[in-house]
Structures are given as C-alpha cells and as structure tokens.
Amino acid sequence: QVQLVESGGGLVQAGGSLRLSCAASGRTFSSYAMGWFRQTPGKEREFVAAINRSGGSRYYADSVKGRFTISRDNAKNTVVLQMNSLKPEDTATYYCAATALNYGLPVKANYAYWGQGTPVTVSS
C-alpha cells in the first residue's frame, strides 16, 4: 500500500512556473514507477508525465514536452513535476499516481495508487 499526497498547486499567470510535489509513504518508494495525470471537469483524466523506478527513463505527453520535467528522489520518497511556460490549457487538477509496473507508464489503468489531487489554474 502506498499513500500519496500532492502539494504545490495554485494560481499562476500564463508563462509562469509551478512546482508540484508528491510525497509517498508506505512501502518502498523505489519499488514503484510514478506518474502525473491531470483532469478537468467533464473530461477523462489524461497522462502528463511518468518516471520509472530508478529515474532513468521519463515519459511526457506531447502537450507538455519541453515545458514540464518530472524527477524523483528515492531517498526522500518524493516525485516532482516542474512546470514551466504554463498555458491556460494546463489548468486542471493534477494527480500523482504510483504503479508496481515498470512499463506502460503512460497508461492510466496501470496505476493502482492515486493521490487526492492538487488544483492548478493558469490565467491568461
């Protein structure tokens, strides 16, 4: 069992930056690959970024590639999503997720554990 708590969301102007953090507790953090997803009302939760167990492989949605960076610190049980050059269309609730799998990381169904989400609003 893994418990995930996100933080760092908020209101930012277009072009600005935010840093989302996800703190994990429970079983060995390094046993899990981690992902970030986002969701807006009435839409499906969509993949944003993921990182494998060691941190050696990272995956991004095309819409955020070059602007967002995912990283993890296995010693601190945290995963971070650095979001730069934010756009109004990045407005959503962002969720941290964990999976025992080390493949198929962009696939939402592969994640067993989810945080409660942190809202991000980007104003134009």
Image (cartoon, helix red, strand yellow):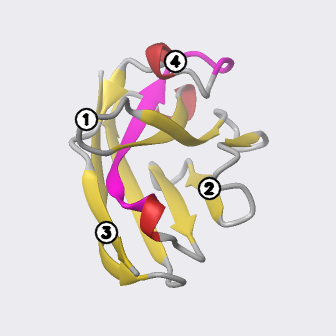
Q: Secondary structure at mark 1?
A: loop
The reply to whether the magenta stretch includes residue 83 is: no
Quadrant the N terminus occupies: top left
Q: Determine whether, in the image, residue 41 is placed left or right of residue 111.
A: left
Residue at numbered disc 3 = 121
Choose mark 1 or mark 3, whichever is in front: 1
Q: Secondary structure at mark 4?
A: loop
Q: Is residue 85 above or below residue 75?
A: below
The reply to whether the magenta stretch includes residue 97 is: yes
Residue extending farthest right: 56
Residue 105 in the image: state x and y as whole percent.
62, 26
Residue 100 in the image: state x and y as whole percent.
52, 18
Over which residues does the magenta segment extend? 90-104
Residue at numbered disc 4 = 100
Q: Secondary structure at mark 3?
A: strand
Residue at numbered disc 1 = 42
Residue at numbered disc 2 = 71
